[in-house]
Image: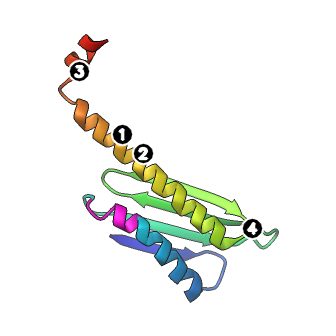
Amino acid sequence: MHKRITFRHMDHSDVMENYANEQLAKLEDFLQNEPTPIYINLVLEPSKVHAHHLIELRVKSPNYDLVSNYEGPDFYDVLDHVIDVMYNELHEEKKKHLDERKTVGRHEEFKKQR
């Protein structure tokens, strides 16, 4: 699993990186049994004009290619929101993949039921 945290237009912060790693652990646990390679890119970008900071999270693997981003006044709240949204999207995508896998070869059977 390849994980990258980028601080765009700001200095590196060990506190923010540690917090981001703690939050990303939830996604890493979910993706643990997925086929590799898995790329997780987190971009932290503050706003110098107003108090709305942008955080973008990308997850790319053989089964998933998802992007989640959010903008808000508090970095920690924005990061929590972005990771929660990505976690929910991953669950939805996994459910879709499982449903598709279950219906392969059974289309005629489902047509008869309608």
Sequence order check: which comes first, mark 1 or mark 4? 4
Q: Give the alpha-carbon distance from disc 1 to disc 4, as whole Å.
A: 34 Å
Spot occupied by residue 98 in the image (x, y as percentages of width and height):
29, 41
Sequence order check: which comes first, mark 2 or mark 4? 4
Secondary structure state at the residue bearing disc 2: helix
Decide: is 27 above or below 18: above
Q: Are marks 2 and 1 in contact (CB under 8 Å)?
A: yes
Q: Specify the label residue 73 is tagged with.
A: 4
The residue segment tinted magenta is 27-33
Of the 4 image quadrants, the one containing the N terminus is bottom left
Which of these two is toward me, 103 or 2? 103
Q: Which residue is mark 2?
A: 92
**Residue at far right of view:** 49
Spot occupied by residue 29 in the image (x, y as percentages of width and height):
35, 67
Q: Are marks 3 and 4 in contact (CB under 8 Å)?
A: no
Of the 4 image quadrants, the one containing the C terminus is top left
Q: Is residue 86 left or right of residue 113?
A: right
Q: Residue at x 35, y 61 (%)?
A: 30
Crowd around label 3: few <14 · some 14–19 · many ≥20 (10 Å) = few
